[in-house]
Image: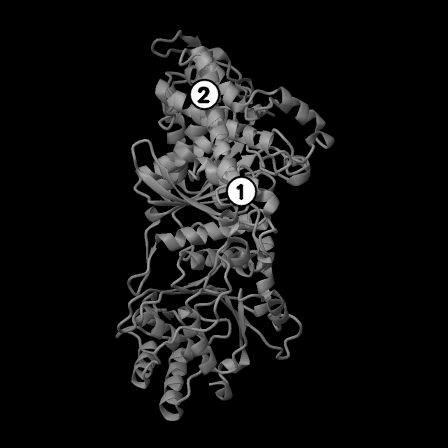
């Protein structure tokens, strides 16, 4: 928009030459200046230099002052004080270069889509004030270089020595390791004792070595033992490859604080691990000691590392983002890092997504996005500080889009030049992140070129020395390949039966509400009929049998968590675990008020998702094996919306990773005239998946069967998942009571 001068006048700004302009110009200057500021906040990322390989940013016309009628002289006439910016400067002319540096350099932001005013304004202030742009001492710079050198040397050594073995090199995104180290240091500074990381294969070995601090000896032994997989007994072939294995370790910060880090096991199914990580973190954050579970997000921090093709391509990512603010699933905010190598296997971004950025999906969930060039280590660290600070303050997710490249093919056996010849040639000629950072430090006089070479030699020598020790002593190859996969016993631990008077007492408690609490009249009548049948006939229906089983477990100290689609009431209105008083707008959960309860009872309606929600409960259950965790489908056939979780985690986790869970699936099942949908829970599929004690499948016919089945499931010495075909019309049938 051009602003024409029509009347003579003069505007002066202290310390600035007076500018002659018209009244119309002076009236329009401030809106034009504010529009330019808004353009940089909204579209500045389009002019940012985010690609290490040097592709030109697209830019945007709104970022050009001339398109707002703002000549250099007019820019000098606009006071910075009216622009509401935090960057330094007295006028728009001073401010504009600062805005370009802030929003359009090697780090850029997308935050203006956020609907919450407080969050949006806080982000503007944090970004423009630059308070998270920490300055590094020379010692810190040398330490960062040393870490980058270890990362690069590790990748190069594995590739050189173990020709043909897959490592899924991190090279091109090397900065991710120092970023994770910085993030864990900040997490430790908040007093958080645990972090849970989910990631796919790329960079996993480097993360295990340098974030979880797993000794090189163990990793090198696995490489040496690779050819022996399958030769140490028939069972061994079911074990998973090294870049899918989970791991645990302790990260120690420079000031001595420690964080227990868990890297979740994951299959080849990209992003499948995301909900497992969230459920794991939630379990670690929860205190189950009292009748009502107490959540403390400071007890654990979830970190998810995504691929640039998988983040927009895999629907489970959207499902997981939707969990961030839900009462039953919130984890105090997740730090998401997109390891963006600008390609998905052999697929270019133009064929992989309909959006400009891999991160655009997150905008729909009010998540701030930080784009950063992976070759600018300083900017990468700054991105971590801003993200951690936002999570700490608002308890919400943040996405860091770490834009780099993949120096080699999808794996070490792949030839990228077949499909991306131009990119491959650019990468070959491009210096590594370590080289760029080392050259920068040498130019600054922080250290000499000779010292840079010494750091490389030291890192390589350590790997060589460790490898010689491994080859000399073999470090027990058989032991490295062993898994915790003994056949799980099916026999339950003897559980003392609940006395009749206790059962009657619980049944009364579970149909009673506090004084002054008004229950729906129809529901109150249903409770009265339920009690009458118990008293007159000694019969217990399905819903009451379940509640009594839960009560018996809670009083012996076993936590119970029940979630699913419409689970609080139950699809067939049989449970009513949460009661509502419409007048008082209050809720009451009878199972949280059982006399003598020694553990928590949780019940939540889930969002209308199967994949993420079942994955979440698997992660929760695997983390707290003493708890009875149940997920209920609205109808049994809906379980196939979570088939990946069932196939890759629930039924195979024990064989692949030695990972077990007590997770229980409740699947309404039965052909009752409703047609092919909502009828079969696919019992036959679960029976096909069952082998070597990995899974239990049950189709109880009476409420008593169900009562004892739940109690047995909660107390088996070896946790094993359970799939229950639950009834529909039989829920209230007297013959099933």
Secondary structure state at the residue bearing disc 1: helix
- Quick one: SS at disc 2? helix
Nearer-the-camera pick, 721 or 294? 721
Nearer to the camera, 478 or 395? 478
Spot occupied by residue 381 in the image (x, y as percentages of width and height)? 42, 29
Q: Count the marks: how many?
A: 2
Residue 444 point in image, percent of width and height: 42, 12
* Residue at image mark 1: 222
Mark 2: few, some, or many residues within 10 Å (few <14, many ≥20)?
some
Seen in the picture, residue 182 relative to 259 is either above or below; the reply is above
According to the image, label 2 marks what residue? Answer: 455
First in residue order: circle 2 vs circle 1: 1
Residue depicted at x 40% and y 56%: 327
Is 521 or 20 nearer to us in this picture? 521
- Which residue: 31% across, 65% down? 599
Residue 16 or residue 51, whichever sits in front: 51
As drawn, the residue found furthest toward the right would be 418
Quadrant location of the N terminus in the rendered image:
top right
């Amino acid at each position: 928009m051009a602003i024409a001068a029509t009347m003579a006048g003069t505007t002066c700004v202290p310390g600035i030459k007076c500018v002659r302009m018209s009244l119309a110009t002076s009236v329009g200057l401030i809106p034009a200046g504010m529009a330019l500021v808004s353009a940089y906040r909204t579209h500045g990322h389009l002019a940012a230099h985010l690609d290490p390989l040097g592709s030109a940013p697209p830019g945007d016309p709104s970022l050009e002052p001339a398109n707002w009628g703002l000549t250099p002289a007019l820019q000098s006439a606009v006071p910075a004080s009216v622009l509401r910016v935090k960057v330094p400067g007295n006028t728009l002319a001073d401010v504009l270069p600062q805005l370009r540096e802030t929003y359009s350099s090697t780090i850029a932001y997308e935050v203006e889509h956020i609907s919450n005013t407080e969050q949006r304004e806080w982000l503007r202030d944090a970004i423009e004030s630059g308070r998270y742009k920490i300055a590094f001492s020379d010692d810190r710079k040398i330490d960062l270089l040393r870490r980058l050198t270890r990362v690069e040397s590790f990748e190069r050594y594995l590739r050189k020595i173990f020709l043909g073995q897959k490592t899924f090199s991190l090279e091109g995104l090397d900065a991710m390791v120092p970023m994770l180290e910085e993030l864990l240091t900040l997490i430790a500074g908040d007093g958080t004792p645990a972090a849970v990381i989910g990631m796919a294969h790329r960079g996993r070995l480097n993360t295990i070595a340098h974030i979880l601090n797993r000794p090189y000896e163990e990793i090198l032994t696995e490489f040496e033992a690779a050819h022996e997989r399958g030769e140490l007994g028939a069972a061994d072939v079911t074990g998973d490859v090294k870049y899918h294995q989970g791991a645990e370790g302790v990260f120690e910060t420079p000031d001595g604080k420690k964080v227990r880090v868990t890297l979740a096991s994951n299959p080849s199914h990209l992003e499948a691990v995301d909900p497992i990580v969230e459920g794991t973190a939630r379990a670690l954050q929860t205190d189950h000691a009292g009748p009502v579970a107490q959540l403390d997000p400071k007890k654990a921090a979830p970190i998810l590392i995504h691929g640039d093709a998988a983040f927009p391509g895999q629907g489970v990512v959207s499902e997981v983002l939707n969990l961030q603010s839900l009462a039953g699933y919130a984890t105090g905010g997740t730090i998401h890092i997109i390891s963006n190598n600008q390609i998905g296997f052999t697929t270019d971004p133009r064929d992989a997504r309909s959006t400009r950025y891999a991160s655009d999906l997150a905008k729909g969930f009010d998540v701030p996005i930080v784009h950063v060039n992976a070759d600018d280590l300083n900017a990468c660290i700054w991105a971590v500080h801003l993200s951690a600070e936002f999570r700490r303050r608002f308890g919400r997710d943040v996405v860091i889009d770490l834009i780099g490249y993949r120096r080699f093919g999808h794996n070490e056996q792949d030839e990228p030049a077949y499909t991306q010849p131009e990119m491959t040639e650019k990468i070959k000629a491009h210096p590594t992140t370590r080289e760029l950072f080392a050259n920068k430090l040498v130019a600054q006089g922080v250290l000499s070129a000779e010292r840079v070479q010494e750091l490389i030699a030291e890192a390589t020598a350590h790997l060589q020395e460790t490898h010689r020790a491994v080859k000399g002593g073999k470090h027990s190859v058989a032991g490295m390949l062993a898994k915790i996969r003994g056949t799980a016993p099916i026999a339950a631990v003897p559980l003392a039966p609940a006395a009749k008077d206790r059962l009657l007492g619980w049944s009364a408690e579970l149909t009673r509400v506090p004084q002054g609490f008004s229950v729906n009249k129809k529901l109150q009548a249903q409770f009265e009929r339920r009690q009458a049948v118990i008293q007159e006939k000694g019969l217990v229906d399905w819903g009451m049998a379940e509640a009594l089983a839960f009560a018996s477990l809670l009083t012996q100290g076993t936590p119970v968590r029940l979630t699913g689609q419409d689970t609080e009431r139950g699809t067939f209105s049989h449970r009513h675990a949460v009661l509502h008083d419409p007048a008082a707008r209050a809720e009451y959960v009878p199972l949280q008020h059982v006399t003598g309860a020694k553990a928590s009872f949780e019940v939540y309606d889930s969002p209308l998702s199967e994949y993420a929600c079942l994955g979440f409960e698997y992660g929760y259950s695997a983390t707290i094996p003493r708890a009875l965790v149940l997920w209920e489908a609205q109808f049994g056939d809906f379980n196939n919306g979570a088939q990946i979780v069932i196939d890759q985690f629930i039924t195979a986790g024990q064989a692949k990773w030695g990972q077990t869970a007590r997770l229980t699936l409740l699947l309404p099942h039965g052909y009752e005239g409703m047609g092919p949908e909502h009828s079969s829970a696919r019992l036959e599929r679960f029976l096909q998946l069952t082998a070597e004690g990995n899974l239990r499948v049950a189709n109880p016919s009476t409420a008593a069967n169900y009562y004892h089945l739940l109690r047995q499931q909660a107390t088996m010495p070896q946790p094993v998942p359970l799939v229950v075909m639950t009834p529909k019309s039989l829920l209230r049938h007297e013959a099933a009571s």
